[in-house]
Image (cartoon, grey):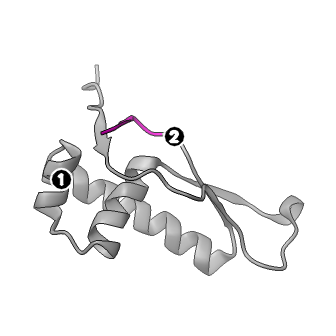
């Protein structure tokens, strides 16, 4: 039986939850879902320039878990940018503090 996922704390809700390439019709787009906890990990490290250990502490998760979230979020964003996919920000196990 897998271990239950801990609730991740986030400080900032996204102001926009959908991003798409310009000039591509919605019906022609593939979508990638970026979880809100992945969004928060990318925001803390890449935008706010917080160290991973401090960012993990602020989200109330371990540093290895934070690192996996960050890697997953970055991979999804890169996939969307390079392959012209839409990004939908939603879901995940989180609480707003």
Circle 2/circle 1 CB separation < 8 Å: no
Residue neighbourhood size for the residue with mark 1, other residues' Cα within 10 Å, grouped as few (<14), some (14–19), many (≥20)? many
| Number of residue marks | 2
Q: Which mark is residue 12?
A: none
Kindly identify the residue that appears in the image at 24 percent across and 54 percent down: 66
Task: Kindly identify which numbered label has been placed on residue 56.
Answer: 1
- Using the image, determine if residue 64 lies above or below residue 84: above
Residue at the image point whose x is 18% and y is 50% from the top: 58
Q: CA distance from mark 2 to mark 1?
A: 19 Å
The image quarter containing residue 28 is bottom right
Horizontal placement of 23 versus 10: left or right? right
The quadrant holding residue 84 is bottom right
Residue 79 percent across, percent down from the top left? 56, 71
Q: Which mark is residue 91?
A: 2
Rendering coords of residue 80 (x, y %):
60, 70
Quadrant position of residue 54: bottom left
Q: Nearer the viewer, residue 77 or 42?
A: 42
| Quarter of the picture holding the C terminus | top left
- The relative height of residue 59 versus residue 41 in the rendered view (above or below) is above
N-term mark: 2 or 1: 1
Q: Residue at x 34, y 74 (%)?
A: 47
When the figure is inspected, residue 65 is found, relative to residue 19, above or below; the finding is above
Which region shows up in magenta? 92-97
Q: Secondary structure at mark 2?
A: loop
Q: Is residue 37 left or right of residue 76?
A: left
Q: Is residue 16 magenta?
A: no
Q: Position of residue 76 (x, y in %)?
A: 50, 64
């Amino acid at each position: 039986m897998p271990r239950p996922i801990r609730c991740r704390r986030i400080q900032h809700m996204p102001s926009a939850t959908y991003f798409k390439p310009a000039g591509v019709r919605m019906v022609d787009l593939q979508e990638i879902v970026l979880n809100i906890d992945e969004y928060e990990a990318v925001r803390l490290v890449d935008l706010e320039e917080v160290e991973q250990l401090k960012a993990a502490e602020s989200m109330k998760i371990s540093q290895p878990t934070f690192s996996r979230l960050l890697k997953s979020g970055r991979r999804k964003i890169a996939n969307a940018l390079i392959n012209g996919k839409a990004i939908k920000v939603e879901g995940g196990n989180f609480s707003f503090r």
